[in-house]
Image (tube, coloured by chain):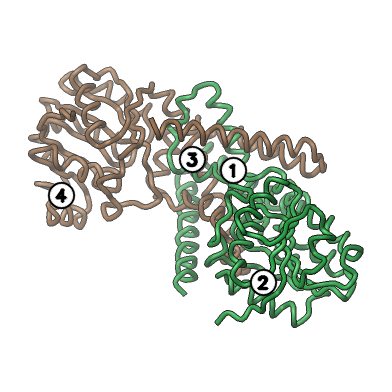
Chain colours: A green, B brown
Amino acid sequence: MITLPPLRITIAGLGLMGGSLALALRPYTPHLTAVDPDPTTRQTALSQGLVDAATDNLAEGIKAADLLILAAPVRAILAQLAELPGCKPDGCLLLDLGSTKQAICQAMSALPPSFQAIGGHPMCGRETSGLSAATADLYHTKTFILCPTARTTPAVEQIALELVTAIGSRPLWLDPAEHDQMVAAVSHLPYLLSAAFMQQAAALARIDQRLWPVSASGFRDTARLAGSNPAVMLDILLTNRAAVLSQLEQYQQKLAMIAALLQAGDETAARDWLEAAQADYNHYRQTSLENTTQ
Amino acid sequence: MITLPPLRITIAGLGLMGGSLALALRPYTPHLTAVDPDPTTRQTALSQGLVDAATDNLAEGIKAADLLILAAPVRAILAQLAELPGCKPDGCLLLDLGSTKQAICQAMSALPPSFQAIGGHPMCGRETSGLSAATADLYHTKTFILCPTARTTPAVEQIALELVTAIGSRPLWLDPAEHDQMVAAVSHLPYLLSAAFMQQAAALARIDQRLWPVSASGFRDTARLAGSNPAVMLDILLTNRAAVLSQLEQYQQKLAMIAALLQAGDETAARDWLEAAQADYNHYRQTSLENTTQ
């Protein structure tokens, strides 16, 4: 079933996402190169046989690549895209894993036509990071968003779909602007909610550390995203600022509404509000279940 | 090791918490009675041999009880406490599982001295509810908060500690007011955050249902608490209103702060804010890990 051709692949950024992709793609590629600034990461990847070559130099790492996959934080990807025409005049197939897509897809669209480029975003983040957290099945059953650019050719489209299938993900095509709006709502907003929540609870726990044994699974789940890599998240927030701020503003209004209902002791309206949330949750779970069992 | 004496126990409210407690206490009691308003729940509990008797009538259900455990939503517990002196003039040992403790412990303190009463709150909620969701290990390794009342005697204190140990929980003594402040921060606030988040995302999904496949594990975890039973949560919020509103207000200030930093593009301050959240999360995880491995 899997028809991914034997391409020479370079992955730039061997963290959780790039490292997991390297693990998942290893069986499909005759030559895998890592570009990573961290010497320990490069050494680990080489000694484990995860990659055939490793360098901190983008130009060197992509010299012989058929397919380049950019897997660094968003603003590092943007910097690499600016370097690419000078590094690789003959171009190559190009995919990225960046968490916001408008800025990256615009930069891809501005590349010389020798680059065949497509934007990508696999929906499988974790609060852990680095190569040591990478697993071959990270992408399994996850949605892998693909965004067309002005440099998207049928050839790279086909390769991207085969790659997504090979690693067990499900492709979903989205316009870059649509993507950024959606992830602001389902990913960037919950990260900020979690980070603010974690800080507020921690301030209380510094006064009374019995707060931790009182904290159960609801606390743990709500706090988990606060552990995300701040450098990665900062790039995301700054390259999707308008959509994130719009989500935050709507959210503050929602909180103000339930606060007002509780303040007023409006039991009927408060119950309606809580019941609406539960109905929405049940619908979401049902939809997710249907998708999972498809 | 477990010395819980063979008491005749009545559990009023056979939902997730009461049902799980019945499962966990079954081996320790010669006679277990359920008081529950739902005929299907009573029939299920009887036919599964989970209880020896079941009734919808509190007075009848507690006639022969040595220990009564109130496991209904908070305001139902308050109503039952008001009935108790009339139902059971000779008194009994008394424990509750209510999620807020000030109102309940005040009502317990006002009971006749024939009642030996202690407030309880096991920290093991779930977003599911009902007897069908109950499991014998729900309480295992969880913190079980105990709150003293004016009717707490050494005898009921001892029984409560033995019961908590028998079901595999860890006792933590808290003053009722301290308890309510803490759970407002670690439980009631995250419920409201989740409920508001779920509603906001669902409104977007009604416009474009591709939002669901874009939603990954971070979404799922942030949305989970929104599925909590609205009737249970409403009782909690209304009997802990001041502490909840105070937590909400602080939280809104935190969100306004990060929104302002992003709006201003203050990268340094935004990075500090994200890093503080991650540091707090890492400390929390470390502390939780230490508690778990104790």
Q: Are marks 2 and 1 in contact (CB under 8 Å)?
A: no
Q: Quadrant of the C terminus of chain B?
A: top left
Q: Position of residue A226 (x, y in %)?
A: 60, 42
Answer with the quarter of the image where residue A167 lies: bottom right
> Which residue is more in the foreground, A209 or B206?
A209
Q: Earlier in the sequence, mark 3 or mark 1?
A: 1
Residue at mark 2 to residue at mark 1: CA–CA distance: 42 Å
Foreground disc of the pair 2, 4:
2
Chain to which mark 3 belongs: A
Q: Position of residue B66 (x, y in %)?
A: 12, 30
Q: Earlier in the sequence, mark 2 or mark 1?
A: 2
SS for tag 4?
loop
Residue of label 4: B50
Residue of label 3: A219
Q: Along the horizontal axis of the image, is A82 left or right of B141?
A: right
Mark 3 closeness class: few <14, some 14–19, many ≥20 residues within 10 Å: many
Chain to which mark 2 belongs: A
Observer able to see residue B82 = no
SS for tag 2?
loop
Q: Looking at the picture, which amino acid does disc 1 mark? A: Ser
Residue of label 2: A30
> Which residue is more in the foreground, B155 or A135?
A135
Mark 1 closeness class: few <14, some 14–19, many ≥20 residues within 10 Å: many
Mark 2 closeness class: few <14, some 14–19, many ≥20 residues within 10 Å: few
Tell me whether marks 2 and 1 sit on the same chain.
yes
Q: Position of residue A174 (x, y in %)?
A: 69, 71
SS for tag 1?
helix
